Amino acid sequence: MKITLQNLTKIFPPRKGSADKKDVYAVNDMSFEIPSGKLVGLLGPSGCGKSTTLFMLSGLEMPTSGKILFDDQDVTDLAPEKRGIGLVFQNYALYPHMTVEKNIMFPLTNMRVPKEKAKEKALDAARLVQIEELMNRKPSELSGGQQQRVAIARALVKMPNVLLLDEPLSNLDARLRLQTREEIKRIQTETGITTVFVTHDQEEAMSICDIMVVMKSGFVQQIGEPQRIYDDPANKFVANFLGTPPINLFHGTTAGGYVLIGGEAVAESPSSAAEEPKNVVVGVRPEGFVYDPEGPFTLRTDHIEVTGRDKTVISRHDASEKPLVRSIIDADIPLPEGANELRFRLKPNKVFLFDAETEERLPL
Ligand SMILES: Nc1ncnc2c1ncn2[C@@H]1O[C@H](COP(=O)(O)OP(=O)(O)O)[C@@H](O)[C@H]1O
Ligand SMILES: [Mg+2]
């Protein structure tokens, strides 16, 4: 099922009792297509409008303006139960007094599907999420990860056209989160159900999504494959939001064909050769630094973290926007012991320039 959002907008009146009397523009003029059979992530910081978008797709929230199409059908005014969707929330919302089996069967018994048929379908869904041995337990007898699988099975039991997941992993501990996200990817690939996955965790979105929609303050910032967005961010916000450790940002200038930071020409900038000097923000991914005693970029070393696979040199620089600069280098590259300063050169494809005012991306 292909999903199309056309100029989708949601404005909330000010909340009752809230000091702020202004309308909230939760989602602003959002237009994009979700291709059939893909796992698409809505990614952005808390409050950027992810859940509101998902609720409009589900029909639980009506848009102020704009349209939603499922394939060629306009579903904007269609009731949630007629849209053929499965929904999963952060808090599993299972019925505590019912067994796992009854929980999974619930959407079917609610539709008056005969009991034997409902049992059969519940078992299929349970097998898909690999909880078929837990059918007779109550939710309180399950781990968080198992409960979330039950919620996913319940969302899948009607074989929806669209699966909508709102921060489904947020209540799980780190290890389970990793495992369950891989499960979601497997289930989505096996079923081929068009899936929209909401998260504020960029690593989570990058690792499982076919396509990411990066949002900020109700506006779409960039849409594309995770690697493509990471390698070619549209603006400073997107560059800064993706990547662990995050990108390093410096106040700099472009002049005479070079990128200058604190008086050092750290990279070439062919596009600036014939231009007036310009203030820019220079982004350098941590993996973009190459240790080089003759390199042009000098950083004041604070300390070095060793992970085994690589080393992170943690430094300071007066032009850095953030207190610390992080450079990741191979574990087997020897560094001089106790040096107060280390010099680096930069990999050009890991250096991004942004307009100092608009924060939009500029060519190198
Ligand atoms: N029912 C509501 N009434 C008023 N404001 C709301 C309501 N629901 C969400 N908002 C506001 O809309 C914005 C987007 O919220 P939401 O979609 O929940 O963000 P996210 O899921 O990305 O954290 C926030 O500023 C939030 O406070
Ligand atoms: Mg939310």
Image (cartoon, rainbow, N blue to C red):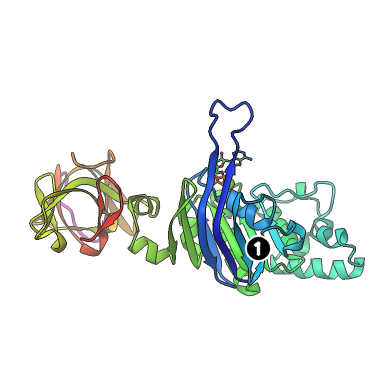
Quadrant, the C terminus: bottom left
**Which x, y percent locates residue 244?**
38, 52
Given residues 329 and 22, the one toward you in this image is: 22
Q: Which residue is mark 1?
A: 163
- Residue ID at (37%, 49%): 237
Q: Is residue 40 left or right of residue 16?
A: left
Q: Quadrant of residue 54?
A: bottom right
Given residues 128 and 17, the one toward you in this image is: 17
Q: Quadrant of residue 35?
A: bottom right
Given residues 202 and 271, the one toward you in this image is: 271
Q: Is residue 285 visible?
A: no
Quadrant, the N terminus: bottom right
- Residue ID at (70%, 57%): 77
Indicate yes or no whether the magenta region holds residue 302: no
Q: Which residue type does callout 1 highlight?
A: Leu
Q: Is residue 91 left or right of residue 351?
A: right
Region rendered in magenta = 328-338
Number of residues whose C-alpha sits closer than 10 Å to that of mark 1, classed few (under 14), some (14–19) or many (20 or more) = many
Residue 302 lies, with reference to residue 275, above or below; the image says above
**Which x, y percent locates residue 98?**
84, 51
Q: Is residue 204 left or right of residue 228?
A: right
Indicate yes or no whether the magenta region holds residue 334: yes
Residue furthest front as drawn: 65
**Which x, y percent locates residue 294?**
8, 57
